[in-house]
Structure formats: C-alpha cells, structure tokens
Image (spheres, rainbow, N blue to C red):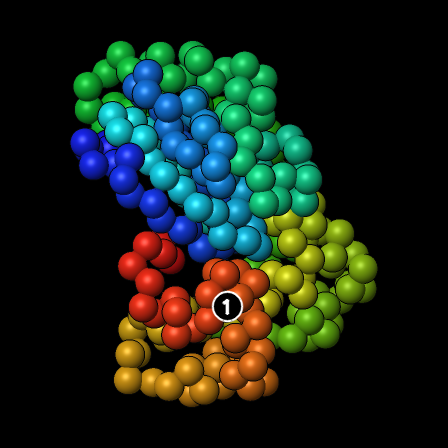
Amino acid sequence: MDCDEDADTQHIRVLPDTCVELFVSYTNTPVAIIDNELHERSIVTFRMSKPMDVQMRKGAGCLAICFHPGMAYLFFNTPMHVLANTVSTMDDLWNGMAAEIEDKLASVSNNTERVGIVQKHLLQHLANKKPNLLIEHCLKQVEASEGLISLNRLSYNNGISQRHLSRSFQQCIGLSPKEYLRMARFLRSLTYVKRHTDLSFTEIAYKSGYYDQSHLNRDYKDYAGYTPGQLVRARHLLY
C-alpha cells in the first residue's frame, strides 16, 4: 500500500470481517490515523465486531497481510479475545522485532522482496505451533453452510459442549461461536448487497439467514453504523 499525495483527504470506514490484518511499514511516514489515533509504525488490527475509521497518511508505505478467519492465533501469543477490536503495535506483539523487520523492508526496492522477508518471519512463528483442529473443523462447517449452521448443530457435530466450544472460539478467534455465526450471516448479506443489486433488503435478509429485515437492520447498525440503505449509498465504506 503506497499512499499518494491525496491520501490525507481519504477517510474510509472499514467494516469488520473477523480477520486480523498486519501492516508492516517501510517508510518513515506514520501509517494511518485509526479512530482518531495516530499510528506511526507497524500495526496489527483485530477488527472482530466493530468498524474502524481509517485515514491513510500521505507518503506512507506498508505491506498488508490479511490472515484467514481463525488462523491469526498461530502467530501471536496473546489470546485473541484479549485483542479483539483493538489496534496493537507490532513491536508490542512481537517483542521489539518490528524495527528489524521494518529496516529490512526499507532496504529493498520492490514488493516481491518485501513479501519474501515478511513471509520468512511469519514462517518462523509457525515453527512448532500446532493448529487447533477443532477450530479448523468448525470453521469449515460454517463455511460449507454459508454461515447458516446453528450453534446447537455445530456443537453436536463436533461432540462437545457449547461451553467448550465457546472457550476454543474465544481463544483462537476472539469471538464466541454465537458472535462468529452472527458475523458470518452479516458478511453473507454484504455479498448479496454487492452482487445482487436487484434484490430488496427483505429478500437479502431471508437469503442471508435472518429471521426478518429488522434483524438485518440491527446488525447493520451494530457492525457498520448505518442502515442497509445508507450503507449502499455511502462511498467511504470498505467491505
């Protein structure tokens, strides 16, 4: 992400998507202003269940890495529920290694080399890490059902209690299973909003698994800060 001369005038609202994103800076310019707070160096965003208002800074350059939902826990030692809905400095999470990585990225002139440097570091974090197979299996079931599987069914399919399931989700994802399924339903509705402009919001609500449009409206207010109609008309939203 290389920000041009107009970057300081571009305010965007980034909607939550259960993903963790890492932004590694390779310039001396502050990376961004997020929710009115200036972030000068490399950061990690844990936007699990609320939007973030972002203003990229003119002249900033950074490499952005988006982790698949439920996979970032392998790269950080802090439980995901502690970090949910926060922006953390890479230095704090990786014990002062940020400056070393930033210097390496700044010393090369192309993104291919930058990707190689960051990838090498990420692979080092994976060494001797064992993935949570329960979480992987659950996320595959949620994806296969397009977010429509019930919490009871998810618990039954995996032969565990809902309490055990909730602990694993909080540890690895940062959300409870119920919250994660709610977010999956919201994201499914956004797909319909983007790709099927001929559908009414009532139709989108039912196709996305909502009981009715009022439940859809509630999630849009919670996750985006807008009604569905306002979201469609807005030009500063990223989703």
**Front residue (pair 24, 149):** 24
Q: Is residue 226 above or below residue 30?
A: below
Amino acid carrying label 1: it is: Tyr
**Front residue (pair 5, 31):** 5
Instruction: Name the residue located 28 percent from the left edge and 35 percent from the top edge.
Output: 8
Residue 148 shows up from this direction = no
- Residue 83 picture quarter: top right
Residue 151 shows up from this direction = yes
Total marks in image: 1
Q: Is residue 49 left or right of residue 134?
A: left
**Front residue (pair 95, 227):** 227
**According to the image, label 1 marks what residue?**
220
| Residue 26 percent across, percent down from the top left | 32, 21
Q: Is residue 208 above or below residue 143?
A: below
Instruction: Name the residue located 23 percent from the left edge and 16 percent from the top edge.
Output: 108
Q: Is residue 77 above or below residue 13?
A: above
Instruction: Name the residue located 37 percent from the left edge and 86 percent from the top edge.
Output: 200
**Front residue (pair 8, 121):** 8
Instruction: Say which element carries label 1.
Output: helix
Quadrant of the frame with the C terminus:
bottom left
Q: Is residue 16 above or below residue 222?
A: above
Instruction: Name the residue located 59 percent from the left edge and 67 percent from the top edge.
Output: 182
Quadrant of the frame with the N terminus:
top left
Q: Is residue 158 left or right of residue 209?
A: right
| Residue 135 percent across, percent down from the top left | 63, 54
